[in-house]
Image (cartoon, rainbow, N blue to C red):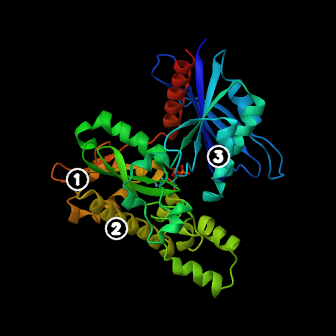
Amino acid sequence: MTDTILALNVGSSSLKFALFSLNGDPCLTPILRGGVERLAATPRLTMAAADGTPLADAVFGGNDGNADVLPFLLNAIESKLEGANLLAVGHRVVHGGRDFTGPRLVTAELLEDLDGLVALAPLHEAQNIAPMRTLRRLRPQLVQVACFDTAFHSTMPEIATRFGLPRAYEAMGVRRYGFHGLSYEYVSGRMQDIAPDLSNGRVIAAHLGNGASLCALLQGRSIDTTMGFSALDGLLMGTRPGTLDPGVILHLLQRQGMTAAQIEDLLYHRCGLLGVSGGIASDMRELLASKDASAREAVELFAYRCASQIGALAAALNGLDGLVFTAGIGEHSPEIRKRVCDRLRWLGVRINEEANDSNAPLISTGASTVEVRIVPTDEEAMIARHTLAKLKNRHRAHA
Ligand code: ADP
């Protein structure tokens, strides 16, 4: 019987999943992928086979804002297993704190430790942990593995993790961690396959999706990144501001009478492209299609911030050999890549417009001193790989 691994990637308002079979071990073959949108209201499940054939499009749960989608999701996936066996579930967990620098088997002790990290990622961590507890109840035989988004950045040198705060705050866990680690780990691994020489050099990976960040990769390992203590820092994002003078927060608290909860809502849900465009959209495609001056400025600010922070990471890397675009905007928007790259001509970046317009894997010209590539990311595949590795360790330990 074929064994399978389910990768779960639970975000604040949506969930992505992918099912992989273990035939041809050590290869993982994708069987199906899908997502659940609007987790809190009326969740909608869509699912398609690896070849794109639609498998499901269904609305479920009530309007109580609390629908636990997991039992529905599990039933929907298990109905497509066709005799295969669901062996393990891997979870993306946003925050691993200081201690979890690699994937962990989910145990009662781990869950307690993870509860202690909820304060570090209040909007995400609890949502990542809840499905683990539900699954332990619903399917106690399943092996579960937690894969941390911060772990890939544990190779950052100490200097890149520091804030200019008194040391006592560092002891409280207030330091730079970095996120999007599963995406960067996947991209870094792909780079070793498709451009091994380049992957041994100095590369900046740009994960540009609704959430967006950059990672400085030296010989494939993270040495710095633009997100820090939280996923608010760094680049301008769909609804988050990116780098913001902390004096603004003080001003909002002390002079504008905003509460901490109001500021949290502002920073996570109402800033970024959405805020700068005057509420037109957080979605890059919509903004690019708009003729509105505020929408145009939001797009320009996105590219400006992206280029200037690439400059900062190029300094951390002491030069730049490669630039890799990934995630929704990075993979699919020639216009944004062009705007960013045009601002990096001083670094020696030259792109081939035809290659860029067709989303080709290599978009720089021969004359470019920086090789510019597009590498589609796959966080779910990375989760499945980590889960498989943990399963093998477990078998070895039991053998
Ligand atoms: P998430 O962070 O939710 O995983 P994605 O990586 O899917 O997000 O990226 C979503 C973003 O990618 C949205 O802003 C969307 O508009 C943008 N995007 C997707 N396709 C295109 C495209 N063809 N052109 C411009 N932007 C695109």
Q: Is mark 3 within 8 Å of ligand 1?
A: no
Q: Circle 2 sits in a helix, a strand or a loop, which is it?
A: helix
* Side of 68 relative to 77 (left or right): right
Mark 1 lies on residue: 370
In this view, the residue in front, 270 or 258, is: 258
Mark 2 lies on residue: 308
Rendering coords of residue 189 (x, y %): 37, 37
Q: Residue at x 64, y 51 (%)?
A: 125
Q: Is residue 22 visible?
A: no
Rendering coords of residue 376 (x, y %): 42, 42
Q: Residue at x 33, y 59 (%)?
A: 338
Query: The residue under label 1 is which amino acid type?
Result: Val
Residue sitting at the far left = 367
Q: Is residue 190 above or below residue 42?
A: above
Q: Is residue 279 above or below residue 379?
A: below
* Side of 212 relative to 375 (left or right): right
Rendering coords of residue 332 (x, y %): 43, 49
Q: Residue at x 28, y 42 (%)?
A: 199
Q: Sequence order check: which comes first, mark 2 or mark 3?
A: 3
Query: The residue under label 3 is which amino acid type?
Result: Asp
CB of mark 2 within 8 Å of CB of mark 3? Answer: no
Q: Sequence order check: which comes first, mark 1 or mark 3?
A: 3
